[in-house]
Image (spheres, helix red, strand yellow):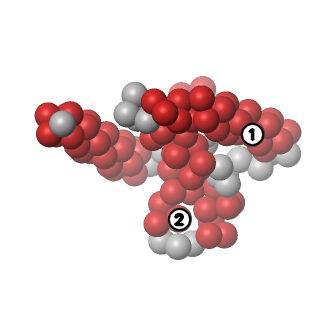
């Protein structure tokens, strides 16, 4: 319905404003990862924002360098966010999300062990 569409559009707009605000705050504070700046330990998604910004510039080598799973992680987030509207695909969405999370954790361990997190 139109009410549902407006509600979802509002949520998407709010999300985009929060993401843009976070990116601007990180640049202003000169940090790339809040968890890393507070604890010294990078998070499993460390480099994801920089990877997506690289992808927007069509800089694929930087995307791969910063975080090669940033796009699948973003897709998983959006799919889970919309699982209510995509109930027909609920099982596939959850399987996809689980696989992406497992691959992200494997990549995280690999990158930590090799000191490869930028």
Secondary structure at badge 1 equals helix
Q: Is residue 116 left or right of residue 41?
A: right
Residue in the picture at 53% in, 30% down: 90
Which numbered disc flags the more N-terminal residue, 1 or 2? 2
Q: Is residue 24 above or below residue 14?
A: below
Tell me: 113 left or right of 66.
right
Q: Which residue is mark 1?
A: 103
Q: What residue sits right under mark 2 in the picture?
A: 55
Q: Could you tell me residue 17's position as x and y percent?
A: 26, 44
As drawn, is 8 to the left or to the right of 19? left
* Place of residue 91 in the rendered image (x, y in percent of width and height, measured from the top left): 59, 29
Q: Badge 2: how crowded within 10 Å, few (<14), some, or many (20+)?
A: some
Q: In this orientation, which residue lies closer to the viewer: 33 or 107?
A: 107
**Residue 64 falls left or right of residue 25:** right
User: What residue is drawn where x is 18% and y is 36%?
Assistant: 1
Where is 21 relative to 54, above or below? above
CA gap between label 1 and label 2 equals 20 Å
> Looking at the image, how many numbered discs can be counted on the residues?
2
Q: Nearer the viewer, mark 1 or mark 2?
A: 1
Residue at image position (65%, 49%) is: 69
Give the SS element for disc 2.
helix
Percent position of residue 10, x then y: 20, 39
Residue at the (53%, 73%) spot, across then down: 58
Question: Residue 112: in sight, yes or no?
Answer: no
Q: Using the rendered view, name the quadrant where residue 102 is placed.
A: top right
């Amino acid at each position: 319905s139109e009410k549902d569409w407006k509600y979802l559009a509002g949520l998407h707009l709010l999300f985009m404003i929060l993401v843009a605000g976070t990116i601007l705050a990180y640049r202003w504070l000169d940090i790339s990862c809040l968890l890393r700046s507070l604890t010294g330990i990078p998070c499993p998604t460390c480099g994801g924002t920089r990877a997506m910004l690289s992808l927007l510039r069509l800089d694929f080598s930087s995307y791969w360098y910063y975080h090669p799973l940033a796009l699948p992680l973003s897709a998983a987030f959006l799919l889970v966010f919309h699982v209510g509207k995509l109930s027909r695909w609920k099982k596939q969405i959850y399987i996809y999300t689980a696989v992406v999370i497992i691959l992200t954790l494997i990549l995280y361990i690999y990158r930590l062990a090799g000191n490869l997190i930028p």
